Amino acid sequence: MPPVISFRGATKTFAGPRGAEVRAVDGVDLDIAPGEVAGVIGYSGAGKSTLVRMVNALELPTSGTVTVAGRVTGTLGERGLRELRADVGMIFQQFNLFSSRTVAGNVGYPLRIAGWSREQRRDRVRELLEFVGILDKARQYPAQLSGGQKQRVGIARALATSPGILLADEATSALDPETTQDVLALLRRVNAELGTTIVVITHEMEVVSSICHTVAVMERGRVIEQGPVYDVFADPRAPATRRFVHSVLRDTPSGATLARLREHFPGRLVTVWVRAGSGARSALSDVLATHSAGHGVRSTIVYGGIRELAEKPLGSITFALTGDDAAVDALIADLRRHTRVEEAA
Amino acid sequence: MTDWGTLAPILWLSFQQTVYMVFWTMLVAGLLGLGLGVALYTTRRGGLLQNAPVFHLLNVLVNIVRPIPFIIFITAIGPLTLLAMGTTIGTRSVLFPMAAMATFVIGRIVEQNLVAVDPGVVEAARAMGAGRFRIIWSVLVPEALGPLILGYTFIFVVVVDMSAMAGYVGGGGLGNFAISYGYQQFDWAVTLVTVLVIIVVVQAAQLLGNRLARRALRR
């Protein structure tokens, strides 16, 4: 299937202080397929927001092109822009609801812009509020709602005109963990039941692991790595991706933790990656068992964690290995035939 | 002793003159000031209708006019008043300087209240495909309505204050009444009663403004 969103050499520069030029987005090539949930991750200031705002033409590329459902954003007039934006919904970290309008008024607003009649709007708003599960709040004002309820209103409002694409800018970052799960479940339903393509900006691992199919990693305006979520997280290639993955997985000891481990555990500290396929858990266990029995290498589990991502295992376990130096070397070499092993210096 | 039998009808007439001046000034300057405030807000850098020359022109104009003491302003724009109202004397003629000054003051207050509107809400409306003018009347103004009502209530008091100067050009009103029949006749009771009437008017306006603002705020 041809992509529904396509960036080609997309660049966005802003005028910075003293005439300096800031490249928020720098020559991005990226395709997003219809029905996909695509994550955009990276540290703040990496250009994620600007990139996503190019999809609904809130930002136009300074050079390069952005094509959305067959429309090149930079060429659209007032009317084309309105049509594009009716086809691209957006939700925000701070919800951005109209405080002067009721829940129903908020959800009905994009329908007003699209010129729906009063009766049509009433029926559609009802349907949407039912879908997001807050029909009973229709007559309330945003100030009376909890964060999770506000984001449900935001989602209902963004879906009002049945857009093919939904943009989510840190949509769960202002919510507590439980509410985050509820909202993510709702987004998953939007994707599964309505077939909506979703682009999510996030810095939360929860979001990536629970709803994204693919992920693009941004650094200093560039997409430095992209692909299926598991591939990018299981085998990050760019140093920045590696740092990001480490910081969200938090499964490898560093700094103070490492020092404490050394204090408590004798031997060499070795971190073993657990992955699907060659890094499978059973294979690694076999290696450890063999060396323990045959060469007297004792392996103590001191740190780590394994989670599931795209239904596959992902994580690392840190062992303190004690025994004859050559035997430990042999164990490490054996483990390396299966997976990546890092020895703490 | 104060002859209230004679003075009461004059006080009533003065009251009506003040209401007349304040009403028309609030109506005309209220609308023009809203327009001016919206223009100041939207033409600024990064605004919906970003336009540096227009913004700077309006901004400088407001800054020049606003600090002029009103009593001096009335005389300074006398020629313009003559052009617009056909006369520079009387209750009707003072409407011109009052409305002009109030427009600038209201413009600034409207601008300040619009600045406080969450830019995220404007962005959300843009993302939904709302045009710029639709955003102004259907998002910006409603979102700022509570503070705007309080701002207009504040202006109401300023305009009542302005109307007291109308006596200078034969405009009548409560201010003129207090000066002519109180101060200049050494009749302190008349001044006091006039002040009480003004206090009641202002209190009533403030009470109404607070109520309306609370309803509009939805918090």
Image (cartoon, rainbow, N blue to C red):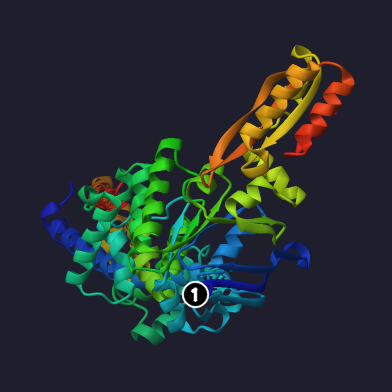
Q: Is residue A239 left or right of residue B135?
A: right
Residue at mark 1: chain: B
Q: Residue at x 68, y 31 (%)?
A: A284
Q: Position of residue B77 (x, y in %)?
A: 47, 77
Q: Is residue A243 left or right of residue A305?
A: right
Q: Position of residue B17 (x, y in %)?
A: 23, 66
Is B141 above or below relative to A92? below
Quadrant in which residue A47 is drawn? bottom right
Q: Position of residue A34 (x, y in %)?
A: 47, 68
Q: Can residue A127 be seen?
A: yes
How many discs appear? 1
Q: Is residue A174 left or right of residue A26?
A: left
| Crowd rating for badge 1 (residues with CA inside 10 Å; few <14, some 14–19, many 20+) | few
* Outermost residue to the right: A326
* Outermost residue to the front: A294
Residue assigned mark 1: B76
Q: Can residue A317 be seen?
A: no
Q: Nearer the viewer, residue A111 or B55?
A: A111
Q: Secondary structure at mark 1?
A: helix
The amino acid type found where label 1 is placed reads Ala
Quadrant in which residue A294 is drawn? top right
